[in-house]
Amino acid sequence: MSTDILLVLCLIIPSLAVAGIVLADKTPNLREAIGLIAALLLVVCVGFLTHAFVNGHATTLVIGEIMPGLAIVFTPEPMGILFALIASVLWVVAIIYSVGYLRSNDEQHQTRFFACFALSIASTMGIALAGNFFTLFLFYELLTLATWPLVTHHGDEAARRAGRIYLGTLMGTSICLLLPAMIAIWFVTGSTDFIAGGLLVDKASPLLTLGLLALCMLGVGKAALMPVHRWLPNAMVAPTPVSALLHAVAVVKAGVFTIVKLIVYVFGTQHLQQCGVTDWLTLLAAFTIVASSVVALNADNLKRRLAYSTISQLSYVTLSVSLLGPLSVMAAVLHIAAHAVGKITLFFAAGAIYTTAHKTLVSELRGMGRRMPWTMTAFAVAALSMIGLPPTVGFVSKWFMLSGAMSAESTFGSTVAVIAIIISTLLNAAYFLPIVYHVFFSGVSVESDQAQSHEAAHGDAPLSMRIALVFTAGLTLLLFFLADALLSLASGLN
Amino acid sequence: MSLSNHLPALQVVIPLVSAPIALLIRQRHLAWALMMVVSWLSLAISVLLWLQVSDGSVISYAIGAWPPPWGIEYRVDSLNAFILVLISGTAALVVPFSLHSIEHDMHQQQHYLFHTMFALCLAGLLGITITGDAFNVFVFLEISSLSTYVLIALSRRRQALVASFQYLMMGTIGATLIVVGIGLLYLLTGSLNIADMGTRLSTLPPSRAVYTALAFLSIGLSLKLALFPLHQWLPNAYADAPSAVSAFLAATATKVAIYVLLRFYFDVFGLPRLNEAGILPLLMALAIAAMFVASAIAIAQSDLKGLFAFSSVAQVGYIMLGVGISNDTGLTAALLHIFNHGITKGATFLLLGIVMYAIGSTDLSRLRGIGRLMPLTSAGLLLCGLSLIGIPGTSGFISKWYLVLAALEAGHGWLAFVIVVSSMLAVAYVWKFVEVAYLQEPDAGAHLQRKPVLTMALPTTVLCAATLYFGLDTRFSLGAASAAAKVLLSGVGGVTP
């Protein structure tokens, strides 16, 4: 099969899935089957695309020119392929999980849910494979719109309020900051193409570069850099599968992916280094990492703690890429993958606990390890990955991140980054390890025991949810041993 | 002389003559059929004219074979051919829509009156656009305005009488100011032919009389085009008129007034004189005020027709901002937005017409859960809303892109931010509808009073598709707009053959 056709299939399959899901509204089993088959087909296509790409079959697909010099273009490149791979594989898992979650919790509007889910994946594929800034922006906005119905899924006042913050922040930043930056880039260079080495090289003065960089970095609200991070904890009102796939993988990763992509292909690491305009970004990212870790430490609601942990982990990526060294950029890309598999597991576990035991607070989890051994073991593995301990993939990315930070050109950036990584690692340990300890080694608390006696005693989560979370936890471990493959893909950058 | 040489005259004469015929027919279905033929013929003529001038040439047609500047000249160039296509295209879609839409908006025995007045209004708007004679502009302006007042008043809603009267007062004041302005220009130049006027005026030294004429024309036309704060007539007129009328007005009426303003500004006064008078910064200030204040008022509306009417005032602000920036890209942006906003707002009001027909109200409190009851209509409104915001992939994005680009080219970086920040207000008013439509449950036992019919659905679908299409393929819209902008910037007398 030619690479062009594969590329088209990667974009079309999730869109067709949307149509299929809507048409199969009345027959839930058929509807879920369509979703699952589409997800599997997508994984196969992305797999073939990766294979073709690794063997040197690069391609560019131009869909149509909207204005002179502004076309919808798709070009696979290493980072995009990696992102597409992660998103498509985790979509399969998330569908399996969602079926169990939605049916166990008897959620309303399931068709809308699965349709928007597929549409979000379609947008994510568009973002991952975009060949210029404009195409990326187009799908970036589509992703915001496609995920809004998922955030407001419950339709009550809290969901509506969260939806307003979600849309207001994400669309506000992208329209008010990112869009003018894009038009300015087009104005200066006459193009928005992603070019190896950077589009703005020799075309923008240091001052202009600094201005555009600030607009772009704060304009990508999905990367949740403080102060535009508030939407993420608010989005946790969504059903847990949404938090898991979208607010731990697709949406937030689209954010940091955009940041890395812009810095590497639009601004150019060399160009930024010559201008010396990224120290503020390093500092802001470091602040976000530490500050959100502190908030996470004090959050009792499990999903809220995970949300703040996500904010801090996303800023690792921004921090790394702001150091501009080849090693740092590679670490940033690696961390996108590493965090995705780990965080989705944690959210899956949180959802499993909610579904089976109806618990949402960290303080209620004592002794849960004995009731839900599969869930809690997966949780523990993923927590290790978040902290960055072997044998999990989190260790690999943190290793490269630290070496990248130490070898960074800017002394200031290097110092800030190393200190931030060390402090936050300690904080990560401080907010994850106690959970793991209490879950496995503390007795069941008295109140919750009394509460339990009123309900039927529960066991572990439903099978489909267990399959999903064990799979992603396994992936967290597996990628530690397969780090070479990831590295060879990520090192194709620069 | 073959018939094709007379296309400019036929463009106006056909709808003008059909008006009394419709009045004599009195039978509503026959009158409607006549209007179908007339509106589609007009569209065909507009497209033919556009094709003839698309190479940059100019068609000059002397009425009664009296050569200009003595006789009345009809003059078609890339600028007004583009507007003609917009007007007749909208009419060709609104007429089929009106067949069922007006059944519940007005008494059956008045339907032939609707068709008569619609024909007059169409003739008036096309006449304003095609004529090259300043006094003729005023005549057609009155024809279109008077027929519009009647069209609004035909509605069964009692408030429509007030809205119509309000529009009558404001419109008459506007027309009076315009005719005084034209009179002054006639005194100064001794000519009524617009191109000739421009050439003669450019040889005159700057004088108070020139500026007075400019002031009269500016205020009079600002009233007609609803530039903030002279927009008071518009929201009520749009909200209380019969649905078909709202859609036609929203897509064309203010746009034609903007066209006249552009014609007088750039072909009679000329850019240097506008700069001397310092009127462009004032326009920009009012445009920015419109973008913010009118959008903020739109957010506070509880009726969708009112909401989108105030949104129109805000969108006129975007167009006038492009005019105020007045470089090549700015005028292109303004003309693009005339077209893109015309189709988007036309589609919006047709959709609201369907909602009105099916539910009997466009008040937000009656539209709870409409996303479930009328999925396609709601999706259409969402699409139009996204276009008003300027989401990529919709036509609104293209005009906003050019507007921001124009601001950057003019060196006004801050203006770029003003433009994008104001679109956040559009997000707020569009999402007001989206939350009601999709996040609230329909009232128990809620049902549609009437099923939307094909004659309503089809034209609406065409306009919605156009809203999407012109966001993805801009060859026609952008090509036409930039050609038209070149005509404007070719300077005074640049259009004389």
Image (tube, coloured by chain):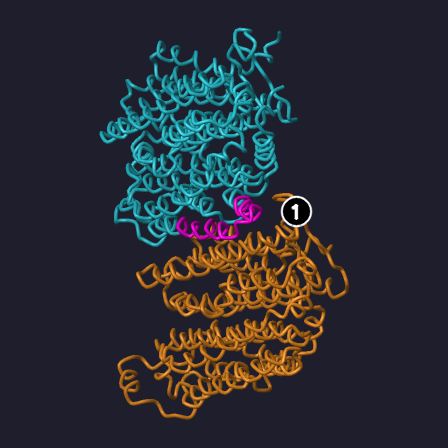
Mark 1, residues whose alpha carbon is within 10 Å: few (<14), some, or many (≥20)?
A: few
Q: Quadrant of the N terminus of chain A?
A: bottom right
State yes or no: residue B384 in magenta.
no
Q: Quadrant of residue B223?
A: top left
Which kind of residue does numbered mark 1 sit on?
A: Gly
Q: Quadrant of residue A369?
A: bottom left
Q: Quadrant of residue B173?
A: top left
| Any part of residue B248 in sight | no
State yes or no: residue B421 in magenta.
yes
| Any part of residue B31 in sight | yes
Question: In the image, residue A111 lies at what x, y percent?
Answer: 43, 56
Horizontal side of A427 relative to A341 (left or right) equals: left
Region in magenta: B401-427
Question: In the image, residue B405 lies at what x, y percent?
Answer: 56, 47
Chain letter for the part of the structure drawn in orange: A
| A471 and B476: which is toward the camera | B476
Question: In the image, residue B466 lies at what x, y percent?
Answer: 51, 37
Prevailing secondary structure of the magenta residues: helix
B83 vs B59: above or below = below
Q: Quadrant of the C terminus of chain A?
A: bottom right
| B300 and A283: which is toward the camera | A283
> Of helix, strand and loop, which one carries label 1?
loop
A436 vs B288: above or below = below
Q: Which residue is mark 1?
A: A69
Question: In the image, residue B7 lies at what x, y percent?
Answer: 56, 15
Read off the chain for label 1: A
Colour chain B is painted in:
cyan
